[in-house]
């Protein structure tokens, strides 16, 4: 009997239609297996859902807070003290010029007389002022940056520009609080990122472990499939789909939880906003968040399953 | 079809499975492998089905050197080598039909063709009426025939059976053996391991007797 030294290659099935049909079949079969154990499936997906919902919900909240800092009442206002010789009429003209700028929001003019009146009411030196023969206070224009240009950096730049005006003697801007607020949101965002990283890892491990248990349960089946010539890809596929489904179902639960949770906060938040005379509402979900949950969940599931499959399938061989 | 060149197999524990075995099996030949328990019969078959790899020497199946076969080609090799075991190795949670269909599903065959082939295979082993049954509801002999149908369904050129009658009474054992002889008529190359010498002596087929991992006797040795 003559033997070839170079083995003839094996016939492989590369028909795309059979390939597609097999994937659809596998996906449905994996879903069916999850559906046949509703309680364990629900518990696993609920844990995954919570793990995804937590950072997503917090992210949306912080996003809202950041937006809020833009139109916070009493926000970063800039006080412009006008030059001495500017009378009320000229001051009004300056105010109107400033109001036309796109990066300027609300403006308010405090005339010299108003300034004096305010000073009289607020301070103990009111009587001392009467001794002076003329009003020593300048007219003041209070402006607030437009909402889109209200960050600390933007406000600072605006203040610099206003200093160039001839009619303006002094620009005073209090950036302290907005810098603090920015630092707080930044810190929150970073914490959420860390939290999201930790919880993603948790999801990865949960799904990996669930798939590992499933692999162990179907130990015998895997051996038999290997025996009759099942490839690694064939054996791997149902487990990868299982991970994918866990991730997707978890993502859907997360969406539900986020919407529900923020919905529950809507009432109190609106009440709180109302006390500040604000129309502010929480936005329940953004398209970007929706997309990242719906893509991230299944992707995490797939990755978790892949980890389990990579570690455990090769060890199961028929004997 | 199958060739062993000075094959030795030593298991991790240091136990010797086979020691210097050389053997040739022609296409379409049926060979009974006998010997006491521990003689190396299972080891011989496992090396052909690549359930184990040789420690020394070379095994050729269907003109391929198994030593050089890459891991990713092993499944395709197994599709050409049907294996039957004493314990059937059926899937308890699937019907007889699904069990028999498994090798075809794994190979990516279309459903119509699978159905046709599974029915033909079940017909050959006389279990056509049991296709919807669960394996546990069948007798030992019937389960073994399901296992046989599962290997026949993909029409592999090589068929290995390790103690296929180990759990069966003499009458059923004979029936199973006669089934194998029938399939051998259509040209399948077969190796059947059994310690039951009385059962196989009357068939007039080649007998290879193993003892402590060596060939003690070969009724059809080429040289
Ligand atoms: N997986 C294994 N690990 C260690 N030793 C083994 C293993 N399989 C078989 N052996 C040893 O190899 C020898 C041959 O075993 P085997 O091929 O199963 O013989 P038979 O099938 O003829 O009873 C025996 O000594 C057995 O103990
Ligand atoms: Mg044995």
Image (cartoon, rainbow, N blue to C red):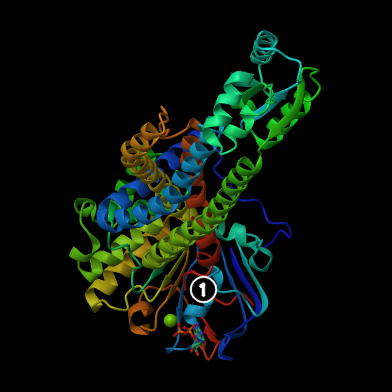
* Residue occupying the point 66% across, 8% down: A89
* Residue occupying the point 36% across, 53% down: A45
Q: Which residue is mark 1?
A: B46
Q: Is residue B220 above or below residue B84?
A: below
Between residues B27 and B10, which one lies in front from this camera angle? B10
Q: On the image, which quarter does residue B184 sit in? A: bottom left
Q: Is residue B166 left or right of residue B105?
A: left
Residue B64 location (% of width, % of height) = 65, 61
Between residues B72 and A128, which one lies in front from this camera angle? A128
Residue A243 location (% of width, % of height) = 44, 52
Residue B47 location (% of width, % of height) = 56, 73
Q: Is residue A140 above or below residue B113?
A: above
Between residues A195 and B130, which one lies in front from this camera angle? A195
The verdict on label 1 being within 8 Å of ligand 1 is yes
Other residues around mark 1 within 10 Å, as few (<14) / some (14–19) / many (≥20) = some
Q: Is residue B41 above or below residue B161?
A: below
Quadrant housing the N terminus of chain B? bottom right
* Residue occupying the point 27% across, 65% down: B143
Total labels drawn? 1
Residue B125 location (% of width, % of height) = 28, 57
Secondary structure under tag 1 reads: helix
Between residues A88 and A252, which one lies in front from this camera angle? A88
Quadrant housing the C terminus of chain B? bottom right
């Amino acid at each position: 009997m003559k033997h070839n030294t170079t083995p003839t290659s094996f016939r492989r099935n590369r028909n795309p239609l059979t390939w597609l049909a097999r994937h659809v079949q596998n996906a449905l079969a994996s879903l069916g297996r999850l559906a046949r154990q509703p309680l364990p499936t629900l518990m696993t997906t609920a844990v995954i859902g919570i793990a995804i919902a937590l950072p997503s919900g917090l992210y949306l909240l912080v996003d809202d807070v950041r937006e809020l800092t833009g139109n916070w009442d009493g926000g970063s206002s800039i006080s412009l003290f006008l030059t001495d010789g500017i009378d009320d009429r000229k001051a009004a003209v300056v105010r109107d010029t400033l109001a036309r700028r796109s990066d300027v929001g609300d403006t308010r003019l405090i005339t010299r007389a108003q300034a004096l009146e305010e000073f009289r009411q607020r301070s103990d030196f009111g009587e001392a002022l009467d001794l002076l023969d003329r009003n020593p206070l300048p007219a003041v224009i209070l402006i607030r940056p437009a909402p889109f240009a209200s960050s600390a950096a933007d406000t600072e730049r605006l203040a610099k520009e206003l200093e160039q005006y001839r009619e303006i003697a002094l620009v005073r801007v209090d950036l302290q609080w907005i810098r603090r607020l920015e630092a707080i949101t930044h810190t929150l965002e970073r914490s959420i990122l860390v939290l999201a990283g930790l919880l993603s890892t948790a999801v990865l491990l949960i799904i990996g472990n669930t798939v590992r248990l499933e692999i162990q349960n179907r130990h015998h089946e895997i051996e038999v499939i290997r025996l009759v010539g099942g490839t690694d890809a064939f054996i791997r596929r149902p487990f990868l789909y299982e991970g994918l489904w866990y991730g997707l179902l978890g993502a859907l639960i997360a969406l539900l939880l986020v919407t529900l949770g923020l919905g529950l906060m809507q009432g109190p938040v609106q009440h709180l906003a109302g006390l500040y005379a604000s129309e502010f509402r929480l936005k329940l979900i953004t398209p970007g968040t929706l997309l990242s949950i719906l893509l991230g969940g299944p992707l995490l599931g797939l990755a978790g399953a892949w980890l389990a499959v990579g570690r455990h399938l090769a060890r199961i061989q028929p004997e | 079809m199958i060739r062993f060149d000075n094959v030795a197999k030593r298991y991790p524990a240091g136990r010797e499975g086979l020691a210097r075995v050389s053997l040739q099996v022609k296409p379409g030949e049926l060979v009974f492998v006998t010997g006491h328990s521990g003689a190396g019969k299972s080891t011989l078959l496992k090396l052909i089905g690549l359930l184990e790899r040789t420690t020394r020497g070379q095994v050729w199946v269907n003109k391929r050197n198994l030593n050089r076969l890459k891991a990713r080609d092993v499944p395709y090799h197994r599709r050409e080598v049907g294996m039957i075991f004493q314990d059937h190795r059926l899937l308890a949670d699937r019907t007889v039909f699904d069990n028999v269909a498994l090798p075809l599903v794994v190979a990516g065959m279309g459903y119509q063709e699978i159905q046709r082939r599974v029915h033909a295979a079940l017909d050959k082993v006389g279990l056509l009426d049991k296709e919807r049954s669960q394996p546990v509801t069948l007798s030992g002999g019937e389960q073994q025939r399901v296992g046989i149908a599962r290997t026949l369904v993909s029409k592999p050129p090589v068929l290995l059976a390790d103690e296929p009658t180990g759990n069966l009474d003499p009458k059923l054992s004979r029936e199973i053996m006669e089934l194998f002889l029938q399939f051998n008529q259509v040209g399948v190359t077969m190796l059947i391991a059994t310690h039951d010498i009385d059962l196989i002596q009357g068939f007039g087929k080649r007998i290879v007797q193993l003892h402590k991992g060596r060939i003690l006797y070969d009724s059809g040795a080429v040289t």
